[in-house]
């Protein structure tokens, strides 16, 4: 396919170009939100496992500290994340 240089270049009206730019920006923001959710959900088990290991190590050193299982670790991490989000929203304004 060759380009016909005898014809003027095809231009896009300004309103249509702005609409296309807005659509691209919305798609980019949507993709960023999806990636952020996937990363946060993927990081949750890792954080819970590390918390469980730390609590087990502290339990080994100090018997007064209870050892917690994986499920409890997941709930603690979820609670800590929710609390951090609430505090961040509280002080953002």
Image (spheres, helix red, strand yellow):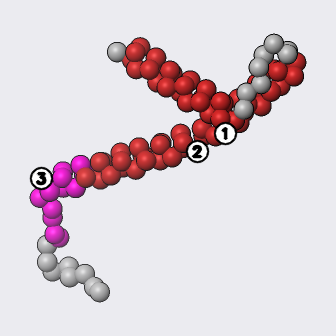
Which residue sits at x=40%, y=50%? 31
Q: Nearer the viewer, mark 3 or mark 2?
A: 2
* Left or right: where 39 falls relative to 51: left
Label 1: how many residues lie within 10 Å, few (<14), some (14-19) or many (20+)?
A: few
> Circle 3: is it few (<14), some (14-19), or many (20+) Cα within 10 Å?
few
Q: Position of residue 76 (x, y in %)?
A: 61, 26
Judging depth in this view, the residue of 64 and 77 nearest the camera is 64
> Quarter of the image holding residue 51?
top right
Q: Is residue 19 above or below residue 48?
A: below
> On the picture, is 84 further left or further right than 44?
left
- Residue 42 numbered tag: 2
Disc 2 secondary structure class? helix
Furthest-bottom residue in this view: 1
Depth check, mark 3 against mark 1: the one in front is 1
Q: Residue at x 46, y 24 (%)?
A: 85
Residue 36 lies, in percent from the top left, at 48, 42
Left or right of 31 on screen, residue 71: right
Residue 2, by quadrant, is: bottom left
Q: Residue at x 65, y 30 (%)?
A: 72
Residue 55, image x, y percentages: 76, 24
Marks 3 and 2, Cα distance to the nearest angstrom?
41 Å
State which region is magenta. 9-22
Which numbered circle lies on residue 15? 3
For the N terminus, which image quadrant? bottom left
Residue 11 among those drawn in magenta: yes
Foreground of the two, 55 or 36? 55
| C-alpha separation, residue under disc 3 versus residue under disc 1 | 47 Å
Question: Residue 28: percent from the left, percent from the top?
Answer: 36, 49
Work out whether residue 64 can be spotted: yes
Q: Do the CB atoms of the residues marked 3 and 2 lie less than 8 Å apart?
A: no
Q: Which residue is denoted by mark 1 in the rendering?
A: 46
Q: Are marks 1 and 2 in contact (CB under 8 Å)?
A: yes
């Amino acid at each position: 396919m060759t380009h016909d240089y005898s014809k003027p270049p095809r231009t896009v009206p300004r309103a249509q170009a702005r609409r296309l730019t807005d659509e691209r920006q919305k798609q980019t923001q949507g993709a960023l939100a999806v990636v952020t959710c996937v990363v946060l959900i993927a990081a949750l088990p890792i954080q819970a496992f590390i918390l469980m290991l730390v609590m087990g190590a502290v339990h080994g050193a100090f018997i007064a500290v209870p050892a917690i299982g994986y499920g409890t670790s997941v709930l603690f991490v979820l609670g800590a994340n929710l609390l951090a989000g609430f505090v961040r929203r509280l002080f953002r304004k």
